[in-house]
Image: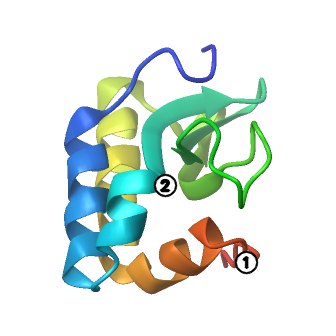
């Protein structure tokens, strides 16, 4: 799985809507970029990448919305679960995502 090949537009819309709900229309328009699957060979991630050229993050920096080890993913159901976890992260961690887009550190537990 090559990072950035499959954008998940519905999650990108959800993220922009959540940032708008938080009063961060500026970030929704200028900073929120792609949400996509990436991997490191053993783990699949659902990452948020800021828009290209966003000055508060270096190219390639990403916010982890969800992750799972390949061995724990059972076909499409595992990917659906990653998407579900990503949707929850956007809903529950919107303020943390906004702080990260502004240049802060990502805090994921």
Q: For this view, does 87 lie left or right of residue 56?
A: left
- Residues 7 and 46: in front is 7
Circle 1 residue: 104
Q: Position of residue 27 (x, y in %)?
A: 42, 65
Numbered badge on residue 49? none
Does residue 1 appear anywhere in the picture?
yes
- Under circle 1, the secondary element is loop
Q: Is residue 12 above or below residue 64?
A: above
Mark 2 or mark 1, which is nearer to you?
A: 2
Q: Residue placed at 20% from the left, 80% from the top?
A: 21
- Residues 32 and 74: in front is 32
Q: Residue placed at 67% from the left, 79% from the top?
A: 109
Image quarter in which the N terminus is found:
top right
Q: Position of residue 99 (x, y in %)?
A: 59, 80
Q: Residue placed at 43% from the left, 31% from the top?
A: 74
Q: Is residue 13 above or below residue 24?
A: above
- Cα distance, mark 2 to mark 1? 13 Å
Q: Position of residue 50 (x, y in %)?
A: 56, 48
Q: Nearer the N terminus, badge 2 or badge 1?
A: 2
Q: Say whether marks 2 and 1 touch (CB < 8 Å).
A: no
Q: For this view, does 97 lie left or right of residue 59?
A: left
- Under circle 2, the secondary element is loop
Quadrant of the rendered structure where residue 104 is? Answer: bottom right
Circle 2 residue: 31
- Residues 90 and 18: in front is 18
Q: Is residue 13 above or below residue 53?
A: below
């Amino acid at each position: 799985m090559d990072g950035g090949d499959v954008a998940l537009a519905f999650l990108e819309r959800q993220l922009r809507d959540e940032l708008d709900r938080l009063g961060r229309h500026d970030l929704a328009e200028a900073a929120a970029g792609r949400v996509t699957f990436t991997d490191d060979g053993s783990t699949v991630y659902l990452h948020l990448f800021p828009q290209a050229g966003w000055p508060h993050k270096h190219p390639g920096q990403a916010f982890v919305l969800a992750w799972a080890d390949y061995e724990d993913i059972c076909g499409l159901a595992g990917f659906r679960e990653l998407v579900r976890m990503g949707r929850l992260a956007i809903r529950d961690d919107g303020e943390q995502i906004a702080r990260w887009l502004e240049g802060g550190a990502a805090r994921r537990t």
